[in-house]
Image (spheres, helix red, strand yellow):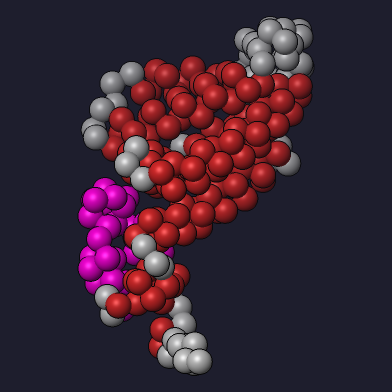
C-alpha cells in the first residue's frame, strides 16, 4: 500500500492561503477570475497544491463559502447579545466585503449545484439568527410583533443594507443619504418613547 503523502512544512498553511486568495480574487475581479492558476499564483504556492487540497474547484469554492459563513454567523450571533440587536444586524449586513462575496456566490450558484446547496443552507441559518435578533430588538422597543413580524423586519434591514453596499460598489449613491437618515431615526428610536405597535418613536440622542 502506498504511503499517504504528507505536505512539507512550508505547505502547512497552504490550504488557508488558497481559501483566502480565492476570496480575494472573487471580491476584486469576480468568481470567473478565480481559476486554479490565478488562485495558486495569488496564494504564492505551486499550482499542483490547489488539487492536492481540493479535488475540484467547486470544493475550493465551498471551502471559501464555509469559511466566510462561519465568520459571518459568529458576528450574527453577537448581535443577539448586543445592546441594540437591530443596529447590530444592520451593521453586519452593511459590510461591503460580505455583500460583494455573497453576490459572487449567488451568481456562481446559478451554474454550480454544490454551491447552490451550500449557499441555501447558509442563508437559512442566517435568516434564523437575524429573525431572533430582530425579535429581541423589536420587543425592547415595545413593538407589536404581529403587526411587524421580526422575520420581515430582519429581511428589510438586511436587504436595504446590502443594497446600499451593492450600489455604492458601482458608484450609485443617489438617495442613500436620505435613506440612511431614515434608518438611523428608526433604529435610534427609544423603546420607551412609543406604545406597542407604533414603529415610530423619537430619535435617540
Q: Position of residue 140 (x, y in %)?
A: 76, 24
Quadrant in which residue 90 is drawn:
top right
Q: Position of residue 115 (x, y in %)?
A: 42, 47
- Residue 78: in magenta span: no
The residue drawn where x is 46% and y is 82% is 12
Q: Position of residue 64 (x, y in %)?
A: 44, 57
Label count reads: 0
The residue drawn where x is 26% and y is 48% is 30
Q: Main secondary structure of the magenta part?
A: helix
The residue drawn where x is 62% and y is 50% is 74
Residue lying farthest to the front in this orientation: 1
**135 vs 68: above or below:** above
- Residue 36: in magenta span: yes
Q: Position of residue 120 (x, y in %)?
A: 51, 38
**Magenta segment, which residues?**
19-45
Q: Is residue 192 visible?
A: yes
Quadrant in which residue 150 is drawn:
top right
Q: Nearer the viewer, residue 182 or 5?
A: 5
**Is 85 placed left or right of 5 in the picture?**
right
**Is 89 placed left or right of 5 in the picture?**
right
Amino acid at each position: 500500500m502506498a504511503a499517504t503523502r504528507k505536505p512539507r512544512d512550508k505547505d502547512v498553511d497552504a490550504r488557508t492561503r488558497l481559501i483566502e486568495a480565492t476570496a480575494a480574487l472573487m471580491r476584486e475581479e469576480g468568481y470567473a477570475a478565480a481559476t486554479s492558476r490565478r488562485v495558486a499564483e495569488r496564494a504564492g504556492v505551486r499550482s499542483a497544491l490547489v488539487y492536492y487540497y481540493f479535488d475540484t474547484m467547486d470544493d475550493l469554492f465551498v471551502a471559501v463559502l464555509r469559511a466566510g459563513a462561519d465568520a459571518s454567523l459568529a458576528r450574527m450571533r453577537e448581535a443577539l447579545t448586543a445592546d441594540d440587536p437591530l443596529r447590530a444586524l444592520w451593521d453586519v449586513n452593511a459590510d461591503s466585503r460580505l455583500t460583494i462575496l455573497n453576490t459572487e456566490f449567488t451568481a456562481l450558484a446559478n451554474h454550480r449545484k454544490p454551491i447552490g446547496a451550500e449557499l441555501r443552507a447558509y442563508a437559512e441559518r442566517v435568516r434564523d439568527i437575524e429573525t431572533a435578533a430582530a425579535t429581541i430588538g423589536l420587543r425592547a422597543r415595545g413593538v407589536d410583533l404581529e403587526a411587524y413580524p421580526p422575520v420581515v423586519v430582519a429581511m428589510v434591514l438586511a436587504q436595504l443594507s446590502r443594497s446600499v453596499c451593492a450600489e455604492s460598489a458601482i458608484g450609485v449613491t443617489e438617495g442613500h443619504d436620505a435613506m440612511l437618515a431614515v434608518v438611523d431615526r428608526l433604529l435610534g428610536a427609544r423603546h420607551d418613547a412609543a406604545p406597542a405597535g407604533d414603529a415610530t418613536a423619537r430619535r435617540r440622542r
